[in-house]
Each structure stands twice: as structure tokens, then as C-alpha cells.
Image: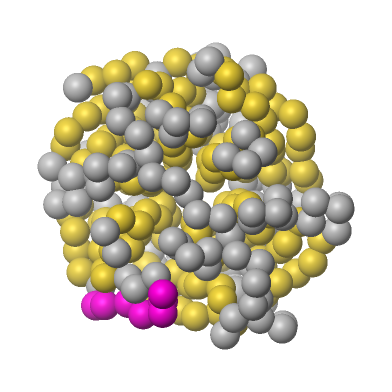
Amino acid sequence: MIVTATPASAEVYALGESPVWDPVRKRLLWVDIVAGTVHEGMLDEGKVTATVRHAVDTTVGAVAVSADGDLIVAGQATLIRLGTDGSRAELARVLPAGIRSRLNDGGVDPVGRFLVGSLAQDDRHGQEVLVRLDSTGVTFLDTDLVLSNGLAWTDDRLYNVDTVPGTIWVRDYDPDTGNTGPRREAFRVTDGKPDGMCADADGNLWIANWGRGRVECRTPVGDLLHTVETGAPHTSSVCFAGPDLDTLVITTSIQHLPEPAPHDGRLFTAKVGVRGLPTSYWSTEDLPCI
């Protein structure tokens, strides 16, 4: 199946990423990484109307939301809590000072722990991390990635993207304990660069393809099932949204495009005939005292 996505936002984002559906408040969240902003919007009949903008003093790699509406934001090197009362608090430092890396894509595991990865902003190779924040503090799951990107959980497994080699990794993941099995390669994407990712209710993975202007639906072993074309070369991330989780929301970017087309950098939507898995709320209980 090949589907063509429809431009859904009036606004253009330099590097749109991390779309998240908040079912309690019926709102969509996303970020503009290089602008350092977190956005809220309403999704109605395939259109996204931006309603609220939160400015952060650093780059913003990802956002997640708690059941109470508080946000956790991946800043340049730290995790930040944005309260519904307007408060801001640093929860944890992930990256040490002096390293030219920044936090990138993140997500919430099935019981509410927040995971986030990093990417290098210099010529270092294979030293980036994937970490998890919980009551014990920051736990390092990977320390040898090139460019940590999309995350998805399905069937008690964690999938994570390493964009530069095009690798989708998988490991067993016990939601109750957080224990993980050995990391192994699930498959590789050889045409384009895999970026943001989510899972559907059938256990398949929807992967944004940076450089190819599309989202690809693949089985857990990499077989290509469906393609959603955006026409925006830098397609960056994806989520299922709406009350029935049946609308695919796609972020794009104008970064490094010498002459962006009118639809580049906008949000897109598509109906793809399947539903997504609900995104867990970030748990604000038992946060570490840091």
C-alpha cells in the first residue's frame, strides 16, 4: 500500500520532531529542535492547529507528557520538567559538560519511564548514548551509538534506531522491572536514513525516512508493508493520534534544504487503515532526587 500524506499545519518548523498524542487533553505535542520550542495543537479532520508554544533556552530533542499534564523535555544536555503551573525544574543531567553532543529523540516505556538518546555535533563516531530516567537516576542502556533516534515498544521488546548505520536494534524489555535482554540487530534500512519511529496495534513499526520523504511501515524483521509519501525530503518522525489512534501524524524539517518547497517543514497527516498503540504517560512518581 502506498498512501500520500496531506500537509496539516500552516506553520513551518526548522526541525519538527517528537509528535505525541495526549488523549486526556485531546492535544498533539511536538517540538522544533533547533528553535528550542515545544508546541501544543489540536487535531481536527486531519488538520493541526497550533495553540500553545513553550520556549526553552536550549535545543529540544523530545517531549513527553504525564497523566496530570506536566511535560518532560529533553534539553541540550539535561531533562527538564515543565509544570502545568508554569514552573520549570531540571530533573537530571544526561550529558557531561564539555562534550559536543545534544539529546535527541525520546519516548516513554510501557510503565512511564522516559528514555532518550543523543547525537554528536562534532566528528566523534560511535560514542552516543541511550539512557533511561527512573527512581534510581539515569541508567545507560547504550553507549556506542552513532546517532540515537526513534524508540518503540511492542510485545515486551524495545526497538531503537541508530540513524547513521541505518540499524534498528531490538532487545527484550521487562516493563515491570526495566530489565533488558541483549541488544541484537532487528534489520537495517539501506535506502535513506531511519529517523523517528512508532508502533501500531498489529506490532509493526512505522519509521520516518530522512532523505527519502516518506514513512515506511515494516514488520519486526524489516519486511516493507506500506509506504506513506510526504514529498518533504526530510521526514523526521511519526505517531498515531486522534481519539481512535487512527491518524498518522508526521513531522518534517527544512534543515539543510537549500531551497525548501512550500510544504517542507510542515506537519502532515494520513489515514493508513490501522491503529496505533497508546503512548504511555510519563510517570512523575518516584523521580530521583537529583
Depth check: give the residue in front, 98 or 132. Answer: 132
Q: Position of residue 205 (x, y in %)?
A: 28, 45
Q: Above or below — where is 258 with respect to 57?
A: above
Residue 195 seen by the camera: no
Q: Quadrant of residue 182?
A: bottom left
Depth check: give the residue in front, 180 or 147. Answer: 180
Q: Position of residue 263 (x, y in %)?
A: 52, 17
Q: Is the C terminus in the top left, top right, bottom left or bottom right quadrant?
A: bottom right
Q: Which residues are magenta?
A: 176-182
Name the residue: 40% across, 22% down: 270
What secondary structure predominates along the stretch shown in magenta? Answer: loop
Q: Above or below — where is 166 with respect to 251?
A: below
Residue 145 seen by the camera: yes
Which color scheme is applied?
secondary structure
Name the residue: 23% across, 20% down: 2
Depth check: give the residue in front, 69 or 17. Answer: 69
Q: Position of residue 188 (x, y in %)?
A: 20, 52
Q: Is residue 114 left or right of residue 55?
A: left
**Residue 177 within the segment the image draws in magenta:** yes
Q: Above or below — where is 250 with respect to 198?
A: above
Q: Is residue 91 left or right of residue 166?
A: right
Q: Above or below — where is 203 with respect to 234?
A: below
Q: Is residue 80 left or right of residue 204?
A: right
Name the residue: 85% across, 58% down: 87
